[in-house]
């Protein structure tokens, strides 16, 4: 599988109700990101509220997105679940719809040991019909994928990379030391506050939620880092920090970043801002804070 270098937005799932997709908003969001130059799309990750969605909605969303994308960029589908059987069913559906790859975090609830993780991901990679990316998300699944575990799993012919959302630059640098020279294994960072630096160190790109809103910004920042234009990279990274410290920090919620992104997309006229249960979209005055943050970034709000 060809290595992808660049920005892969973890796409939000536009909703207008608990069991209804915002189909028109989904189409607008896809076109907005593709026009912004993103290198792939990642569906049903944390930013996509995957674990809050019914299986019906997950399947419907995968089919809708892949039909709209129509092969213009690669699409990855998240299959994280506490049930391997459900992960495999969604993986098969993703393949049938035209996805290029799959992404899986560790099963959550009881925290597995490193040996159990090796056995689990090996079995999953053996069974899925598409290449598999590992997803290190310790804040949500209660366990780190240890660098030694990742190194062992990287030898599996169907495990092709890892997205790290630990926000731990020492961890990411360790992975680069162990695996960064391999052409058959990719390393991406989720924390957009450190994407530029991670690309400079040798990372393959960013899986950055802010690229839902501002794809051109993140793509340009990646290109500056990739080409070693450090001055320009830092200029753009400062703007990304402005996004992170305003839009992602409204209210005292663990879900503030997702609420902020969806609220911003709504104010930009792209898609609805409904969140799946048990979460709720921003109302006044929080929505007003998002409006002010967008205006400070030079964005004209239409919603």
Image: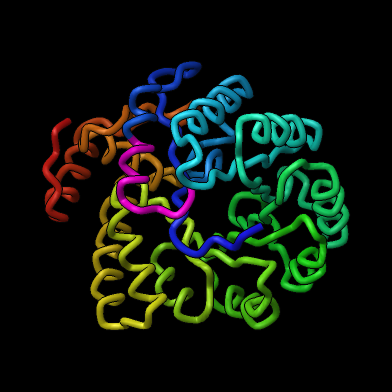
In this orientation, which residue lies closer to the viewer: 251 or 213?
213
Magenta span contains residue 33: yes
Magenta span contains residue 64: no
- For the image, the number of numbered tags is 0
Picture coordinates of residue 71, whole percent (x, y):
50, 40
136 relative position to 61: left or right: right
> Vertical placement of 180 versus 295: above or below?
below
Going 86% across and 48% down the picture, which residue do you hit? 123
Rendered image quadrant of residue 142:
bottom right
> Vertical placement of 264 versus 27: above or below?
below
What range of the chain is rendered magenta? 29-40
In this orientation, which residue lies closer to the viewer: 106 or 215?
215
Q: Is residue 249 visible?
A: no
Going 71% across and 36% down the picture, which residue do you hit? 91
67 relative position to 120: left or right: left
> Vertical placement of 35 versus 20: above or below?
below
Picture coordinates of residue 46, whole percent (x, y):
53, 44
């Amino acid at each position: 599988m060809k290595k992808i270098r660049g920005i892969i937005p973890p796409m939000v799932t536009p909703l207008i109700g608990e069991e209804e997709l915002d189909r028109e908003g989904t189409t607008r969001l896809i076109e907005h990101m593709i026009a912004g130059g993103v290198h792939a799309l990642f569906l049903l990750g944390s930013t996509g509220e995957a674990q809050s969605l019914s299986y019906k909605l997950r399947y419907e969303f995968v089919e809708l997105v892949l039909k709209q994308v129509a092969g213009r960029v690669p699409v990855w589908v998240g299959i994280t679940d506490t049930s391997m059987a459900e992960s495999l069913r969604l993986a098969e559906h993703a393949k049938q719809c035209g996805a290029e790859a799959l992404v899986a975090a560790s099963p959550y609830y009881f925290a597995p040991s490193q040996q159990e993780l090796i056995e689990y991901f090996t079995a999953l990679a053996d069974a899925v019909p598409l290449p598999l990316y590992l997803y290190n998300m310790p804040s949500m699944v209660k366990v780190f994928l240890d660098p030694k575990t990742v190194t062992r799993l990287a030898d599996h012919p169907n495990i092709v990379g890892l997205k790290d959302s630990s926000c731990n630059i020492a961890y990411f640098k360790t992975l680069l030391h162990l695996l960064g020279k391999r052409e058959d294994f990719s390393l991406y960072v989720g924390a957009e506050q450190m994407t530029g630096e991670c690309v400079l160190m040798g990372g393959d790109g960013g899986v950055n939620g802010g690229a839902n809103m501002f794809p051109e910004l993140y793509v340009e920042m990646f290109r500056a880092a990739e080409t070693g234009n450090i001055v320009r990279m830092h200029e753009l990274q400062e703007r990304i920090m402005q996004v992170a410290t305003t839009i992602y920090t409204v209210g005292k919620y663990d879900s503030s970043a997702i609420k902020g992104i969806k609220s911003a997309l709504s104010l930009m006229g792209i898609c609805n801002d409904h969140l799946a249960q048990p979460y709720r979209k921003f109302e006044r005055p929080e929505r007003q804070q998002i409006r002010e943050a967008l205006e400070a970034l030079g964005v004209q709000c239409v919603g």
